[in-house]
């Protein structure tokens, strides 16, 4: 069976925990080394990885590229627009062709269906680098970051304030898989998708929807937000979303309702002083740059798992 990494809810929780442990170990093993130093074991030696982007990216692009190279592999960064994929070639044919050249495909795309079709027709593992619906690599890094600072995330209270978007859906999947409670606070029109809420509840964790952001954040161990307008959202929705989401801004007054040792996360890129103030982004609770760094370590563990290394 192919180890695709498509979503957190469809990946075995024991495998997720194993990847998390690998990520911590791999990070520790290269502490203090210059970024370009190769890992001692070179698990990807001789492997070629295609990184396809149909949307912009800084972190996903650079962290995958650096990670593969640290592990001894090679990468090819491809823009969807410049591929035949952007000019009518089917996803299925693209998957079949790329599988003849490379050992693994990472894709950032729009529709969930594109990712699924790629995985269905590829004969090499496929990794989800973000879709309109989910962003599992991000949440692997977020769970890693939480545990690095505060120990096991199981049983903790995580509060999402803002848009119930793709990153939020993957957080709900993680709540079910890693066993933490999740509270969403935001306007009803921007609630997280039902299926993700149901998944977490069926796994036995508490999922609450609380319209009052201050009540929601009471006693939180971790407060998370993300941009109010995602890459797939129409520009025309911007003003309405800003008006709806302003009460859910993460600022110092909101953070004061969380536990004193609560962490603050944002997957970045941030629109400072919209979804979160600079005082919070740069404040004592914030671990946003550790999160960004941990994309690298978490994804290296995902790559190993996908390739059975
Ligand atoms: N957080 C994240 O995925 O960032 P990029 O869009 O820069 O890849
Ligand atoms: N929700 C954001 C995340 C960016 C990393 C988006 O999809 O644009």
Image: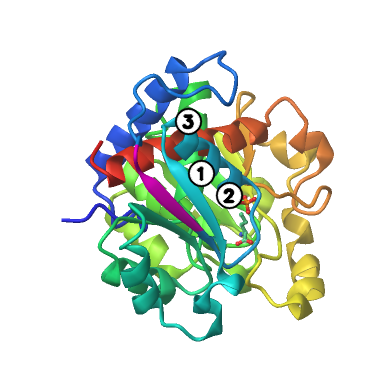
Q: Residue at x 34, y 28 (%)?
A: 22
Residue 275 lies, in percent from the top left, at 75, 52
**Residue 229 appears in view:** yes
Q: Label 3 vs label 2: CA separation?
A: 14 Å
In the foreground, 241 or 131: 131
Which circle, 3 or 1, is nearer the viewer? Answer: 3
Q: Are marks 1 and 2 in contact (CB under 8 Å)?
A: yes
The disc placed on residue 64 is: 1
Going from N to C along the chain, the mark reached first, 3 or 1, is: 1
Q: Quadrant of residue 119?
A: bottom left
What's the residue at 32%, 38% (across, down)? 304
Q: Position of residue 198 (x, y in %)?
A: 35, 63
Q: Is residue 112 left or right of residue 309?
A: right
- What scheme was used to colour the molecule? rainbow
Residue numbers of the magenta segment: 46-51
Q: Quadrant of residue 179?
A: top left
Can you tell which quarter of the image residue 96 is in? bottom left
Q: Is residue 28 left or right of residue 261?
A: left
At horizontal 28% and vertical 52% (from top left) the residue drawn is: 11
Specify few, some or many for label 1: CA neighbours under 10 Å numbering under 14, 14-19, or 20 or more: many
Q: CA distance from mark 1 to mark 2?
A: 6 Å
Q: Residues within 10 Å of mark 3 (few under 14, many from 20)?
A: many
As displayed, is residue 149 above or below residue 218? above
Q: Callout 3: helix, strand or loop? A: helix
- What SS does tag 1 mark? helix
Label 2, on which residue?
Answer: 61
Q: Quadrant of the N terminus?
A: bottom left
């Amino acid at each position: 069976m192919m180890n695709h990494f498509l979503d957190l809810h469809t990946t075995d929780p024991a495998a997720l925990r194993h990847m998390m442990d690998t990520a911590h170990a791999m990070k520790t093993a290269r502490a203090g080394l210059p970024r370009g130093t190769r890992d001692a074991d070179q698990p990807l030696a001789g492997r070629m990885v295609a990184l396809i982007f149909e949307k912009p990216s800084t972190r996903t692009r650079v962290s995958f590229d650096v990670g593969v190279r640290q592990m001894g592999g090679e990468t090819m960064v491809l823009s969807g627009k410049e591929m035949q994929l952007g000019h009518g070639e089917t996803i299925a044919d693209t998957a079949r062709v790329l599988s003849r050249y490379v050992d693994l495909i990472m894709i950032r795309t729009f529709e969930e269906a594109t990712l699924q079709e790629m995985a269905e027709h590829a004969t090499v593992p496929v990794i989800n680098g973000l879709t309109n619906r989910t962003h599992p690599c991000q949440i692997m890094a977020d769970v890693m970051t939480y545990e690095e600072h505060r120990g096991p995330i199981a049983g903790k209270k995580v509060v999402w304030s803002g848009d119930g978007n793709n990153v939020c859906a993957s957080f709900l999947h993680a709540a079910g898989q890693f066993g933490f409670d999740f509270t969403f606070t935001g306007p009803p029109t921007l609630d997280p998708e039902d299926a993700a809420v149901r998944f977490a509840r069926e796994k036995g964790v508490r999922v609450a929807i609380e319209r009052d952001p201050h009540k929601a954040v009471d006693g939180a161990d971790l407060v998370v937000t993300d941009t109010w307008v995602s890459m797939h959202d129409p520009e025309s929705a911007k003003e309405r979303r800003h008006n709806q989401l302003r009460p859910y801004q993460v600022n110092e007054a909101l953070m004061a309702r969380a536990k004193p040792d609560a962490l603050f996360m944002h997957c970045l890129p941030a629109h400072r002083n919209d979804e979160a103030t600079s005082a919070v982004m740069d404040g004592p609770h914030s671990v946003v740059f550790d999160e960004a760094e941990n994309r690298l370590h978490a994804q290296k563990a995902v790559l190993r798992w996908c390739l059975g290394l």
